[in-house]
Image (cartoon, helix red, strand yellow):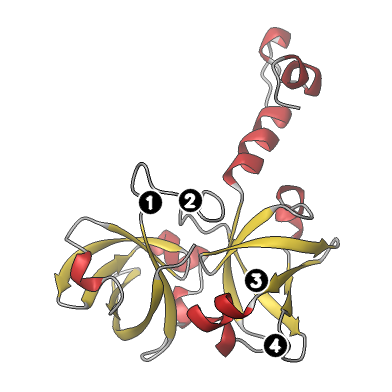
Amino acid sequence: MFTGLGKVAARSPVGDGLSLLVEAPAIGAECAVGDSVAVNGVCLTVEQATGSRLEFHVGAETVQRSTVAGWQTGRPVNLERALATGQRMGGHFVQGHVDCTSELIKRDPPAETVYFTFSLPAQWRPFVAEKGSIAVDGISLTVTEITEEDFSVAIIPHTIEHTNLAQLSAGAQVNLEVDILAKYVYNMLNWSDESPENTITKEFLAEHGFC
């Protein structure tokens, strides 16, 4: 779900992308060149590892799809190494493939549990369900409520303490990644070609145990 906090140490434009240097005290010493690391939910490849500092190249597609372009030096970021085979998985499968950005609409006054409400672009509404999973800046969260335009999540004290959510205020931009399983189901239900026997239907999925 999240390994620890880091911060942006430096950034510079490189062609259509960015060079990003991240101070990663929680995981930096364990990382090597070629490793995948999710930075605020964005899957990046380590190009250089020096002590607790990790350097990444951010491609043009990632810049376009995520909030990376707005990250300034000193910004706190959530860090997560790739899941190792055989480990327990807290949360859900998160690939680090950001689908879109979202805006924090509101957060309830501080309490033991804090409710955050984020905007939800219309094209991603079919992939989000109440009590389902969604990744916000790489954090696996459970949807508590959803409307046609937004969704809410409940944040417990441990999550507030160990992620950058504590720094978010209304208007902040975050990265969203919807559940990969929802993507595949949606794709199967909506895919067809000219051959009727190749059409995936709700009845077909039910017959094979998927509904």
Q: Amino acid at mark 1?
A: Leu
Q: Position of residue 10 (x, y in %)?
A: 28, 86
Residue at screen point 16% across, 68% down: 48
Query: Of the numbered discs in the image, which one, if any, rests on residue 170?
Result: 4
Q: Quadrant of the C terminus?
A: top right
Secondary structure of the residue carrying tag 4 is loop
- Pointer 1 with pointer 4, Cβ within 8 A: no
Q: Quadrant of residue 61?
A: bottom left
Looking at the image, tell me whether mark 1 or mark 4 is earlier in sequence order.
1
- Compute the Cα span from label 3 to label 1: 25 Å
In this image, 203 relative to 195: left or right?
Answer: right
Query: Of the numbered discs in the image, which one, if any, rests on residue 102?
Result: 3
Q: Amino acid at mark 2?
A: Met
- Pointer 2 with pointer 1, Cβ within 8 A: yes
Q: Amino acid at mark 4?
A: Ala
Per the image, the residue denoted by label 2 is 89
